[in-house]
Amino acid sequence: MSHHILELKDLYFSYPDGTEALKGISFKIFHGESVGIAGSNGSGKTTLLLNLAGHLLPTKGEVSIGEILLTKKTRHEIRRKVGLVFQRPDDQLFMPTVYEDVAFGPVNLGLPSEKVDERVRNALEMVGCLNLINRPPHRISEGQKSAVAIATVMAMKPDILVMDEPASNLDPKSRRQLINLLKGFKHTKIVASHDLDLILDVCERCMIMKDGEIVADGPAEEVLFNEALLGENNLELPLSRQNSRLSFR
Amino acid sequence: MSFDREYFNVGYLDSLSYRDTFVHKLDPRVKVLVSFIFILFVVSFPKYDLSGLMPYFIYPVFLLTAGDIPVKAIAKKVLYISPFAIFIGIFNPLLDTEVVLTLSGLPVTGGWISFLSIIVKFILTVSTALLLIAVTSFPGICEALARMKLPKVFVIQLLFLYRYLFVLLEEALRMLRARDARSSGKQGKDIKTFIRLISVLLLRTIERAERIYQAMLSRGFRGEIRVLNRHKLGIQDILFVIFSVGMFYIFRNFNIVGFLGETVSRSIR
Amino acid sequence: MHMADALLSPAVGGTFWAGTLAAIAYAAKKLREKMDERLIPLMGVLGAFIFAGQMINFTIPGTGSSGHLGGGMLLAILLGPYAAFLVMSSVLIIQALFFADGGLLALGANIWNLGIYPCLIGYPLIYRLMVKKNSSPKMIAFASILAVVVSLQLGAFSVVSQTKLSGITELPFSTFMMLMLPIHLPIGIVEGIVTAGIVNYVRSLRPDLVENIESVKVLPSGGSLKKIIVVIALFAVLAGGVFSWFASTYPDGLEWSIEKIYGKPELPEKAHPVTEMLSEIQKKTAILPDYSLPAVKEEEKKPSWPSVDTGTSLSGLSGGIMVLGSVFIFGIGVKLVRRLRKRT
């Protein structure tokens, strides 16, 4: 088994106004794993992701990516290793054209322009949006925006891809395309979502969060088919699982 | 004009600006420069020189036709804003009543001539401004401004504004629809409701700025933003400038119109 | 109120463009010195907000007419004068291009009138001096109204001066002033109220966000405040000079035109009530006649009236029609060429 790529040791985080959002979280994620994080609103999913990606610094405890421990000094390096795709693609695509958005990361890495160009094209190819390369972001569809947002992160060649509610604004077709895309990625993936069917499709492992703690962690099919567990956490069985138990009248 | 309409108009002009005609492909610096020079020439005409302005229509007509811009879009806008110019200009015929020529018996005062001159100048300048954006995308204009040495922080902020323009318009539209759905008729339009609505929009906007900033940080932002320069001056750009400005100069300093008129009336006799 | 290209002369338009560009460069420089990188997305997005906000109408109580947000003062309160000025300029640029509000030449003057006065004068010299960290909502309202009213009056005055200095319109200076200044008073009061209303409401809803922004603002140092005051003093002198010059020429202009009008036999009926009304207004603006001034060059005023050049002679007119016709044919020709090219 490959070495772990992400490790959380007893992570605590409180917001400036005193709210304790994360209460002692510990887990390890291994190279190449795809992990889902499910939980109701307010469970702390987004806060956890922001800590993982170095946007927030732990109040107590440790976050390590590879060999690097997250501190004020190492945050920039951590941010390079963790590609965080935020919830709303509109907020991630802020440049005048798709090309410049995807190039933003590589340019900030200090790469020369031919390399930047190469990274941009490869990343767009990966998400199937190469034809959008010169378009302005406000003239592409929501699904395309989600895909391009992923490309902006992939162009930095992160070690881990972390996504917060990737399909929340998508119509069914775009959602399906996104799922297929993610299934094809060999990267280490962490996906936080309400969409349990998406997690089921994309992730082998799933954790459930409640009130800032991890209350379950195991193979996705075990965790997500445990009705009692889900019920305790304001969740329901994935829709695909619900259907198979419908009786035909 | 209602919010819906104005939103649509902005979006429409914006979508036209990404087309691919000969005019669209000209370097934006050239288009901005020539349009500006055009306007300078047009407004430099003295108040009674009405017919000297006529040849200048060739520039907006060229942009319109070669840029494949629908006439209706431009004409509607020009008409819509004309009341202001008419309101100010109408004082001319009211105050300047010296008759300067008679047209088949009808006396025409200097005031009417200068009024028409204002109207013609208005049509020429306003249509040119609209056509400029219709044939040059806004990022193109920003590139032109940056290369003409406007401060970088200003241009970058302009680009951000443009990027989120439609997002904000969408949000505002949604809020307005919600307001209209909840208030029948005029109720929703009072100042108090407006303040509430706008404040909420403002707060959402500030939060959005924070999210954008986080997204920028996540991709390594350290304070510098680099924007692409996509255009290089080509021979067609240089020719365009020389030809246009040359024409404007000739129209201003040679009485083409009078000459044409006299030649024709002489040959008729 | 926006200036329009058609009412400007190249000299006036060009001068104000130069002034505006200088102000933009200055504000950008000031900003760069102390800017928090968070400001960049914030400025852009707030600009989009103002643009969208301006498109929402509300009814002004008592009159039934609709008003809308100007935004300059609100921006200054949120972002500080320099950033606010840059954002306001951007909003005006977008309006000039997409709505043709004013025009490209007038844009320089518009940015000056609608950007500099609220952001670089009204805010730092009035609002900022009156409002402290814990000022009451009433204080904020009062300061906001005062600052906005002053800014709008300055703006209105500038529009009138710019128009008159350009010499395109016959609209007499003090009539225009009598129209513009009083109208912008209630407009200013309403905008001041709305601005304060927004500031107070936002403060009460999300004091944390307001705190955030306070930390990011770039404010003028004592030194730059002094500079601003010097510039204003100069401007006041200049404005006073311009104002009085026109004040002195105006009575002559009006009398002269009245003389001309009464001297002409075939007189359109319209002129009478108008000039009578104007002379009424002129009598009311009693301040003007008391000004003692340098010699009024009446001869300079005259040439502009009767000097009508070939443009208005008959051949000029027919020539003009022919030119328009040729331009029209030219346009059709271009369209044909495009269509042919598309086929090949």
Image (cartoon, grey):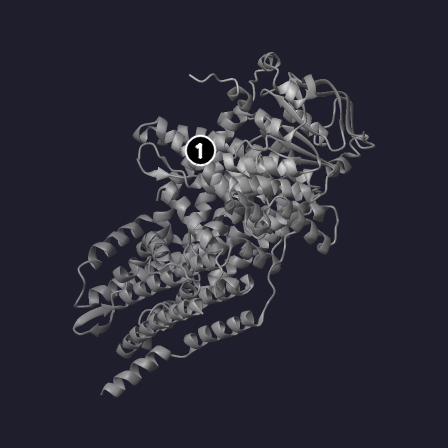
Q: Name the residue at 43% across, 66% down.
A: B66
Inspect this view and state whether residue B11 appears.
yes
Q: Residues within 10 Å of mark 1 (few under 14, many from 20)?
A: many
In-front residue for pair A118/B153: A118
* Number of marks: 1
- Viewer-closest of A188 and B207: A188
Q: Determine whether, in the image, residue A184 is placed left or right of residue A159.
A: left
Left or right placement of residue C49 versus residue B257 in this view: right
**Residue lying at 20% horizontally and 64% vertically, measured from the top left:** C262
Q: Amino acid at mark 1?
A: Val
Viewer-nearest residue: C112 or C128:
C112
Residue B192 in the image: x percent, y percent? 40, 28
* Residue B145 position (above or below residue C82): below
The image position of residue A6, as x and y in percent, is 77, 29
Relative to B235, B185 lies left or right = left
Q: x, y percentage for residue C224?
A: 64, 45
